Image (cartoon, rainbow, N blue to C red):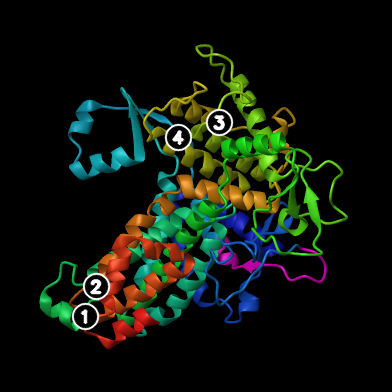
Amino acid sequence: HLFHIASIGLLTAISRRYPQHRSILVEDIFPILLQLPSSKKARFTYPISLTGKTFITLESSKISSVANCKKRRRSSISNEPGEEASNIQAISVLILSLIQSCVTFPTYEDCDDNESNGHKEKQKNIDMIDSVTTNDRRRRSGIVSCQKLCDYFVAQLLQRCSRKGEDGGASEFRPVLNSLVDDFLIMQLLPEHPAAEMILLTLCRGLGNDIFKASSYGDFDSKRNSNNNTTEATYLATSFDILGKITSSMAELLSSQRESPLSIQRNIEENLHSSLQGRKVHSCFCGRHSLVDTLMVSCDKCKGFYHAECVSQTRETIKEDWMCDDCTLKDVAIDVIRDFSSHRSINAHKPISPSREKITPMMETHVFRQLILAYISNKCDIPGIHFAREFLLAQWVKELDTTDSLKDLCGIDSNVLAQYFLDIWNRPLVNPLTSKLENTCPLSDDGYRRLMIALLTSKSELVQSFPRQMGLLIQFMGDEKLVSVRKLAVKALSQVVDADSNLMLHPSLKNAVSERFGDVAKSVREAVVG
């Protein structure tokens, strides 16, 4: 593991120092992918952890199969003697680290109207996406280079996977693609690997484009469509399987947030109601009410009871004064808002009183992000963790820049928040002058899991593309000319429905599936029934 860390640190340092050599580094990864050990035990050797414990989703949680690792079962277990650690491939960490090392500080550029008028329409569209114009100044996104390297890697990988027959090791690259996607789905819940979302979204776009070209909807003549010579059949099956796998992970994230939402304002109202009632309630988020002879811990603030294993507590580690994650979030929200108010003196508005004002969605997201920064600050011993922090800050600034200037009840708008993240860009990861929040991890393992899910479901571009991905699969399931496309689309959708059966209540999906029961092809009917 130390060798892995040193190697990844060296390569990311080279990538950061010599941008012109990044494509060469990426090209060198592909021969390594084919030389990885065939044994899973020898290949998955990089441990993943959160707040000192191996982190993957709880087996009892609805999100437990978010990585869809049916072939690689994992559970949430601690790194204690006698227990098996959860591992991923070191090459997956290297790929994301290289992408994150390309981040740059978002800077303003002067806009030259004469020069802009001479640009091509395509370049103007790109500039509109990758930069933000304010009067005569334009702020360039700090993750443009990250996206370029991500696009290059995904394009090269899919190109190798799509080669026909055994040419170029295509049959060997496809299993590698599957294992990489499994790792990326796990890593998207880890704050130190924010580029996982970017590469998954890029994969969805690339695979969706390849499937579209292979279907009858592509721009091909009817003869080529009928013979299906444009795309190798095995690659088409792999593309549908991976697209279904990623889409099903989105469905599970959305389902988990819907069933166990993490909302500061909702927690404040529920805690207030419990206090007024004066009752002790069983409020564990796992929903298991029938367990007996199980250690329970009580929150000193809301008087709710939780299973000790669900909140990462034991008889030996439980503190005399203990608060649940929901109550901790409320207190952290007050501290963060006060810290933000002192950092950015908003003289035009009345002082912020979090205990009296409602926590708005904008400020709630800001609190969640401050907790993520606090987590990363406690991971300062991990090589390249500062790249992850800068990637997150640049990503948040881009999101706030591309959002209309909104102002919440506290008098804070998106422009002020964006400037706040830029102001703390160069703040050291460990600094005794920073707020108390950035030097501790106040939440439990599951608290951070729920925090990541809340952020992904509300702000992630990948999860927000879920309706579009579902629409594509439904469209491919209606391809009247190609039986293979319809059958593979049905199988991909079955993965999504397995993740969230409530999706079958949607009229468009319900009608599309009903039509396939009467499909002329037996293989399609069998896929629907199966």
Please tell me the numbered disc located at residue 214.
2
Which badge, 3 or 1, is on the more N-terminal residue?
A: 1
Residue 145 vs residue 235, the one in the foreground: 235
**CB contact under 8 Å: marks 4 and 3:** no
* Residue at 42% over, 61% down: 153
Q: Is residue 268 above or below residue 517?
A: above
Give the residue type at disc 2: Ala
Residue 359 - label? 3
**Amino acid type shown at disc 1:** Asn
Within 10 angstroms of label 2, few (less than 14), some, or many (20 or more) residues?
many
Eyeballing the image, is 409 above or below 275? Answer: above
Q: Residue 382: x and y, percent?
A: 67, 51
Say whether residue 160 is visible: no
Instruction: Name the side, left or right, on which 277 lies relative to 22.
Output: right
Disc sitting over residue 115 in the figure? none
Marks 4 and 1 sit apart, C-alpha to C-alpha, by: 46 Å
Pointer 1 local density, CA inside 10 Å: few below 14, some 14–19, many at least 20: some
What residue sits 59% from the left and 33% below the top?
A: 426
- The residue tagged 1 is 228
Image quadrant assignment for residue 293: bottom right
Q: Quadrant of the N terminus?
A: bottom right
Determine the CA span between mark 3 and mark 1: 55 Å
Q: Nearer the viewer, mark 4 or mark 3?
A: 3
Q: Decide which of tag 2 and tag 1 comes sooner along the chain.
A: 2
The CA span between labels 3 and 2 is 48 Å
Q: Residues within 10 Å of mark 4 (few under 14, many from 20)?
A: many
Q: Position of residue 464 (x, y in %)?
A: 40, 50
As shown in the figure, which amino acid type bears the numbered disc 4? Pro
Alpha carbons under labels 4 and 3: distance apart: 29 Å
